[in-house]
Image: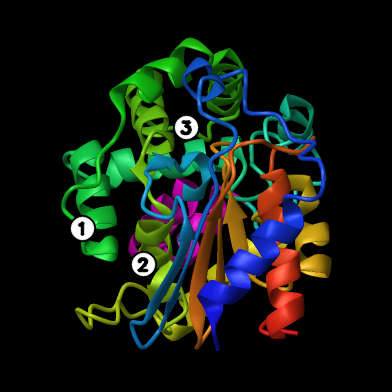
């Protein structure tokens, strides 16, 4: 299949429609990103790669990183992780305090902010040097030792993180946070500041398309069962309260971030990452969502 030609055709078709999205202005470092950038990269499980546009430009992956921290914790705690976070779609905004209080400090799933903070608390308990070990894990998945946190983005996250602090204090009051709040939040803010290109992102997630095994290193990251469950969780919870729309229109497990990135997985076939900074009202890339809808429609390569 001529993926690069398909990418170009869909991109030019999208150029004919107004981009109604807005960059994430509540995080100052993201507010200054050029909204006209666009990239896409697809990697097959056999190792073939196909790119278009700004696919090699690194950007802040933000909440996409929550899948990676979850996988790291899930591989260590296994089923015990579900004592700390649920696995249901939120049905409310990703930073809802109301839902968290109703659920007595147990986040609806590990991909909303509160859930990712709990995962960071678990990793702080499990790891001797959490920030360095999480970064090393991401580098192993990507095969790229040059991936880094962006300290300016991490600082910007902290400076605008009042609501995230409110969540961790609320969860602490319910006994669902074990470690020092600043230590947990430092890991969380750095996690969200990870920078990757579309190519690096698609490559990093390839183990989820390959039954839990990194193709080029043969390292098993998750068992087949936990790989299936992680993909299922992305399918139902990867897009906040727009997960149903993504499933309905795109038909792939995936995860978005407010940096404008989306990564999606077709088990057994490929991973694809798309980046367009302007976001829709739900916090997902406006053109990224439209692009992937068109891509799976044209290629008929969804899981449904």
- Left or right of residue 74: residue 90: right
Q: Report whether residue 88 is seen.
A: no
Q: Which residue occupies 81% across, 67% down?
A: 249
**Residue 141's spot in the image, x, y percent?**
28, 64
How many other residues sit within 10 Å of disc 3, few (<14), some (14-19) or many (≥20)? many
Name the chief secondary structure element in magenta: helix
Q: Which residues are magenta?
A: 65-85
In the image, what residue occupies the spot 56% across and 20% down? 31
Locate the N terminus by quadrant. bottom right
**Is residue 67 shown above or below 278?**
below
Tag 2 near tag 3, CB within 8 Å: no
Residue mark closest to the camera, 2 vs 3: 2
Residue that numbered label 3 is attached to: 177
Q: Is residue 67 left or right of residue 87?
A: left
Residue 99 relative to residue 208: left or right: right
Figure check: 104 above or below 265 = above
Nearer mark to the viewer, of 1 and 3 = 1
Tell me the tag on residue 203.
2
Residue 64 visible, this orientation: yes
Q: Secondary structure at mark 2?
A: helix
Return the x and y of residue 115 as percentages of the image width and height.
Answer: 57, 42
Instruction: Find residue 4 and name its label.
Output: none
Residue found 70% across the figure and 34% down from its top:
104
Tag shown at residue 144: 1
Q: Residues within 10 Å of mark 2 (few under 14, many from 20)?
A: many
State the image coordinates of residue 153 (x, y, percent, origin top left): 39, 24
Vertical side of 109 occupied by 168: above or below? above
Q: Is residue 223 magenta?
A: no
The answer to which quarter of the image holds residue 216 is bottom left
């Amino acid at each position: 299949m001529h993926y690069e030609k398909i990418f170009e055709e869909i991109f030019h078709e999208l150029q004919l429609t107004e981009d109604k999205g807005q960059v994430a202005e509540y995080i100052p470092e993201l507010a200054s990103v050029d909204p006209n950038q666009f990239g896409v990269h697809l990697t097959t499980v056999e190792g073939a790669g196909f790119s278009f546009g700004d696919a090699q430009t690194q950007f802040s992956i933000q909440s996409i990183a929550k899948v990676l921290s979850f996988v790291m914790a899930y591989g260590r705690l296994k089923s015990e992780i579900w004592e700390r976070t649920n696995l249901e779609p939120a049905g409310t905004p990703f930073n809802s305090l109301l839902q968290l209080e109703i659920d007595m400090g147990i986040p609806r799933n590990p991909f909303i902010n509160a859930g990712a903070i709990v995962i960071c608390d678990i990793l702080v308990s499990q790891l001797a040097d959490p920030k360095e070990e999480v970064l090393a894990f991401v580098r192993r998945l990507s095969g790229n030792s040059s991936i880094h946190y962006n300290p300016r983005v991490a600082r910007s996250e902290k400076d605008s993180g009042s609501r995230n602090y409110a969540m961790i204090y609320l969860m602490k009051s319910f006994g669902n946070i074990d470690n020092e709040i600043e230590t947990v939040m430092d890991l969380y803010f750095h996690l969200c500041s990870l920078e990757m290109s579309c190519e690096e992102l698609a490559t990093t997630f390839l183990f989820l398309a390959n039954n839990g095994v990194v193709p080029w290193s043969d390292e098993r990251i998750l068992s087949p069962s936990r790989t299936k469950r992680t993909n299922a969780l992305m399918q139902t919870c990867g897009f906040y309260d727009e997960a149903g729309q993504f499933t309905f229109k795109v038909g792939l497990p995936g995860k978005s971030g407010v940096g404008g990135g989306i990564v999606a997985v077709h088990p057994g076939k490929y991973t694809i990452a798309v980046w367009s900074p302007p976001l829709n009202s739900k916090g997902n890339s406006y053109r990224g969502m439209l692009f992937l809808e068109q891509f799976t429609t044209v290629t008929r390569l969804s899981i449904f």
